[in-house]
Amino acid sequence: MTTSSAPGKVYLFGEHAVVYGEPAVPCAIQRRARVTVEERDDDRLQVQANDLTLDGFTVTWGGETNDRPDVDVPAPLVEAAMGYIDGAIEQALDAVDVEECGFDITVESDIPLGAGLGSSAAVVVAGIDAAVRELGGELDAQAVAERAYEVEYEVQSGEASRADTFCSAVGGAVRVRGDDCRRLDDVPTLPFVVGYDGGTGDTGELVAGVRELREEYDFAADTVESIGDIVRKGEAALQRGDIEEVGRLMDFNHGLLSALGVSARSLDTMVWAAREADALGAKLTGAGGGGCIVALDRTEQTHTALEYTPGCETAFRAALDTDGVRVEE
């Protein structure tokens, strides 16, 4: 039996634009998904999932299933989650050159599902690592990241970027642009505060919506390019330790994401609550449509304000996680 874990993430800048070749800067946070894998005597998968904003479920299948677990999130998210697990196991078997193998798999996570914190990437990264190790193999973090990206690309119908999986695999703050992925050195302490509205966004639908806007309106394409400009300025500010400038650029980034139609009233409400509490900056994180915002605040004011904001289900601090995927004892 082998357990691996991987962190979730928040985006400082660049979600949606990264799909079109612009850079993005996601940061791993100290919220993790843990995947435990134990080899079975047959070639079936039994998956038990806990704490994924679900009631919890157990389902057994041999690659495909018609079972419908009783969960409190939309069915497409559940089907996608099962697709991520399937894909992770396929990648692990390919990595160790094994054709068929069954596993008992337990997924535990303190990352809300579909909330923009990279829950799927963390599960895939941890799942690949755990399954490979259970079969006697080992992959370095970048190899895990590449295989995890292949899974997300397949499940998300070609709309995925390498940002989430690379960040989850290597940890810390990273810069991603297309196939160019690297970890940023000497990143200062980032006082993250996350607000969660309890909802989920449909990543595929939101990405498709931005694509349609870009194709129909030149100014929407210009907006995506402007987000790329913000990322470049934000990366420079981050590396010189200018957290105030990072915050101001986060505010700009949120405004442009709102213009592209991927925010939501609950997200905007939390963003404004954070700003009115004197956060250095605040924006949605992830695909949008519901889920989480991230703010920068060295004080407790933003955390307190979010806890009293209508529509905010929970708020928490989330320190930068410098560890990526790792084996858990």
Image (cartoon, grey):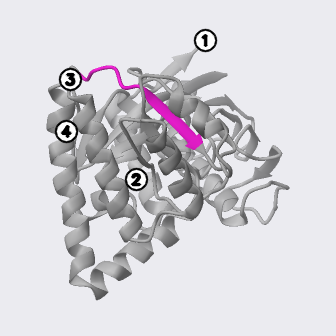
For mark 2, does the 10 Å Cα neighbourhood hold few (<14), some (14 to 19), or many (20 or more) residues? some
- Check residue 235 in the rendering and tell me which mark sits there, or answer none: 4
Q: Mark 2 near mark 1, Cβ–Cβ under 8 Å? A: no
Front-lying residue, 70 or 321: 321
Circle nearer the N terminus (3, 2): 2
Identify the magenta region: 187-195
Report which quarter residue 212 is drawn in: bottom left
141 above or below 195? above
Q: Give the Cα separation between the discs numbered 2 and 1.
A: 28 Å
Q: Give the Cα separation between the discs numbered 3 and 2.
A: 26 Å
Query: Residue 206's x, y, as percent?
Result: 48, 69
Label 3 vs label 4, nearer the camera: 4
Circle nearer the N terminus (2, 1): 2
Please give the name of the residue rendered at 20% of the width and 62% of the height, measured from the top-left corner: 226
Label 4 vs label 1, nearer the camera: 4
Query: Residue 308's x, y, as percent?
Result: 67, 39
Per the image, the residue denoted by label 2 is 150
Q: Is residue 227 left or right of residue 137?
A: left
For mark 4, does the 10 Å Cα neighbourhood hold few (<14), some (14 to 19), or many (20 or more) residues? many
Quarter of the picture containing the C terminus is: top right
Per the image, the residue denoted by label 3 is 185
Circle nearer the N terminus (3, 4): 3
Residue reaching furthest bottom? 216
For mark 3, does the 10 Å Cα neighbourhood hold few (<14), some (14 to 19), or many (20 or more) residues? few
